[in-house]
Amino acid sequence: MSRIVRTAADLLYPVILIFGLYIVAHGHLTPGGGFQGGAVIATGGALVIVAYSYKEISGWLKKNVLLGREVIGLVGFIGVGLLALAFGQVFFFNYLAGSGSLFGMPVPYGINAGELNTAGVIPLMNFAVGIEVWGGLTIVILYMLSGLEKEGC
């Protein structure tokens, strides 16, 4: 691709990354969440992959690192659910809601002011799903483009 496309991709990728993380972080307050935010972040990865050649990108985005990101997200999601068992509750019980600790602030009555410190374990699960989807969809995009590299495109 041209230098203009590469420069635009370099400038847009951090913005897309921040927007995807915003969608993940506000998933319990607004439409969105882990899957949608992870998909937005993976789309930013697709933008960079399209702007550069497959050989350059495969050197930057290692499939093992993306697979590790996918595994960390999956283990984090299941770990949040299993942690409820350690507190003597059922699997995926919202043990942080209303506790006053991390993400445990009670939701105020009336209009929601958009406090991120609410919803208990739901934001933790959103972040785990976002990390997993980010890694998984980027791997899918890399595998799809690896066919182009074999054809010499």
Image (tube, helix red, strand yellow):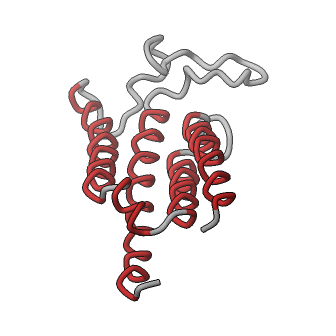
Q: Which residue ends up furthest to the bottom in the rendered image?
A: 151
Q: Position of residue 122 (x, y in %)?
A: 48, 35
Outermost residue, top side: 100
> Splitting the image into 4 quarters, where does residue 64 fall?
bottom left
The quadrant the N terminus occupies is bottom right
Q: Quadrant of residue 112?
A: top right
**Relative horizontal placement of residue 105, taking residue 73 as reference (left or right):** right
Query: Farthest left residue?
Result: 86
Residue visible at 55% across and 20% down in the picture: 117
- Please name the residue shown 32% across and 35% down the image: 80
Q: Nearer the viewer, residue 153 or 113?
A: 153
73 and 121: which is toward the camera: 73
Left or right side of 146 for 13 = right
**Residue at x-position 66% and y-position 60%:** 5
Q: Is residue 29 above or below residue 152?
A: above
| 118 up-or-down from 70: above or below | above
Snapshot quadrant of residue 17:
top right
**Quick check: 54 above or below 66?**
below
Q: Nearer the viewer, residue 139 or 82?
A: 139
Counting from the top left corner in percent of width and height, residue 114 is at 69, 25
Farthest right residue?
A: 111
Image location of residue 71, percent across then percent down: 27, 50
Q: How many marks are shown on the rendered structure? A: 0
Residue at 43% across, 31% down:
121
